[in-house]
């Protein structure tokens, strides 16, 4: 084990209690996307205790720099997202959310904590590295247009120019102590579909006098599955799902309209654009064929996330050195979306996963679940891993 590896592990472990306290504070005070005012202020106060000044970006985000004392010009960006979700927490933890209807159910409290921990470690190791670490605390990952795009537009990747981006995200499918990496294509683009099918309502016993938007909506849902099952190249991962259908009629009332919301996800930009046109064509013409009409809005969301091949392979090798090869897994493609994708499309990036699962303690629930929680033993691992990767990547100047 190298000197720097020993130092990082030792410092990370010594921070365990403090990291738990930080995580619990953030967890107990969740704020929704682009409303992270107190979270941002807390991050700023914590960095100030380390004599690390920061600036505000994208409304509630924070950015800070740690300069190494050795010669070097390379800049590595480390990113953590800050926002919570509109979920009622169902756990009985002493640190459960104190804000009704809001919860850190995606682990962003963990991400902020690990990045603050990395700041504490790296700040003490300035004499061990050259170059600059840019700490990026990003708002609004859970809501379009995504805080990453806003931060980039405001220049977060410049002054100084970021050469490499590294992001870390909890993964409750992986046991605590394990990390996961995937070079190349990893996560999907995401587009939101909002659709209103408009017919003619009336009595359910006299459908011949009406234009039933419920049956038309059903036809549209079925027809749209052809986009993925027949129009898409089978080699391109694609998903089209509707998760919300509202028809405000009754047992004997055909409603005037049906409202639907869904998502389309893929990993290829030309096909993404073509699919949008196919979706629009099918929706409009299916409705027309049954005497109804449809209003469709496609809100284009995050791009697909592609990890830089060489960088990610290198980071995986470094993780194996830091944790042991048996504690590092190869990840499959995941059709969820992440606005870290904006960073990955701008600079060479590595977005990897931190295991937080502990079955013996019942910590098994997925992200976005009201019972989601983590094994806090993951906190020093996450803080140490970010520090280790940042310093070793900086060495390659």
Image: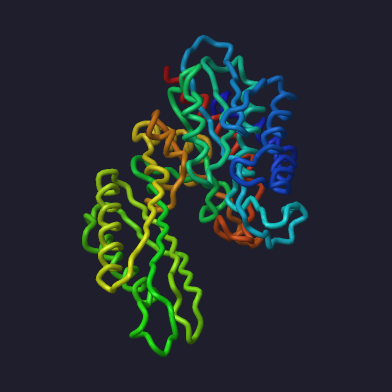
Q: Quadrant of the N terminus?
A: top right
Q: Is residue 372 above or below residue 257?
A: above
Q: Residue furthest right?
A: 94
Q: Residue at x 74, y 43 (%)?
A: 25
Q: Position of residue 370 (x, y in %)?
A: 63, 61
Frontmost residue, 140 versus 343: 140
Frontmost residue, 46 versus 150: 150
Q: Is residue 357 left or right of residue 217?
A: right
Q: Position of residue 278 (x, y in %)?
A: 25, 56
Q: Residue at x 62, y 43 (%)?
A: 110
Q: Is residue 72 left or right of residue 364?
A: left
Q: Is residue 138 above or below residue 281?
A: above
Frontmost residue, 35 versus 203: 203
Q: Residue furthest bottom?
A: 205
Q: Quadrant of the C terminus?
A: top left
Q: Position of residue 340 (x, y in %)?
A: 46, 39
Q: Residue at x 42, y 46 (%)?
A: 301
Q: Is residue 110 left or right of residue 389?
A: right
The image quarter containing residue 172 is bottom right
Confirm whether residue 187 shows in the render: no
């Amino acid at each position: 084990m190298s000197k720097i590896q020993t130092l990082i592990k030792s410092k990370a472990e010594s921070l365990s209690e403090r990291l738990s306290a930080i995580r619990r504070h953030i967890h107990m005070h969740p704020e929704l996307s682009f409303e992270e005012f107190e979270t941002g202020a807390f991050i700023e106060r914590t960095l100030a205790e380390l004599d690390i000044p920061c600036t505000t970006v994208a409304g509630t985000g924070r950015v800070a720099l740690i300069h190494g004392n050795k010669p070097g010009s390379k800049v590595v960006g480390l990113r953590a997202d800050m926002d919570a979700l509109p979920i009622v927490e169902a756990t009985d933890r002493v640190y459960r959310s104190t804000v009704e209807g809001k919860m850190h159910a995606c682990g962003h409290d963990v991400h902020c904590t690990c990045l603050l921990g990395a700041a504490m470690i790296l700040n003490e190791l300035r004499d061990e590295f050259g170059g600059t670490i840019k700490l990026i605390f990003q708002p609004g990952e859970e809501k379009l247009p995504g805080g990453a795009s806003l931060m980039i537009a405001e220049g977060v990747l410049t002054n100084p120019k970021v050469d490499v981006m590294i992001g870390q995200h909890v993964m409750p499918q992986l046991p605590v102590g394990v990390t996961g990496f995937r070079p190349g294509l990893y996560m999907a683009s995401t587009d939101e579909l909002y659709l209103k099918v408009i017919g003619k309502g009336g009595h359910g016993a006299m459908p011949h006098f009406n234009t039933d938007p419920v049956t038309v909506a059903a036809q549209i849902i079925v027809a749209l599955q052809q986009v993925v099952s027949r129009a898409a190249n089978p080699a391109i991962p694609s998903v089209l799902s509707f998760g919300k259908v509202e028809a405000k009629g009754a047992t004997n009332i055909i409603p005037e309209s049906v409202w639907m919301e869904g998502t389309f996800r893929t990993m290829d930009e030309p096909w993404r654009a073509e699919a949008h046109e196919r979706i629009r064509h099918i929706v409009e013409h299916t409705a027309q064929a049954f005497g109804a009409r449809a209003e469709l809005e496609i809100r284009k969301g995050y791009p697909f996330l592609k990890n830089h091949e060489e960088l990610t392979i290198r980071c995986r090798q470094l993780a194996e050195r830091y944790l042991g090869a048996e504690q590092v897994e190869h990840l499959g493609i995941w059709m969820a979306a992440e606005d870290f994708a904006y960073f990955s499309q701008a600079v060479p990036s590595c977005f990897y996963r931190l295991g937080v699962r502990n079955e013996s303690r019942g910590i098994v629930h997925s992200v976005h679940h009201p019972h989601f929680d983590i094994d806090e033993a993951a906190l020093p691992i996450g803080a140490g891993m970010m520090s280790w990767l940042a310093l070793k990547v900086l060495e390659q100047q």
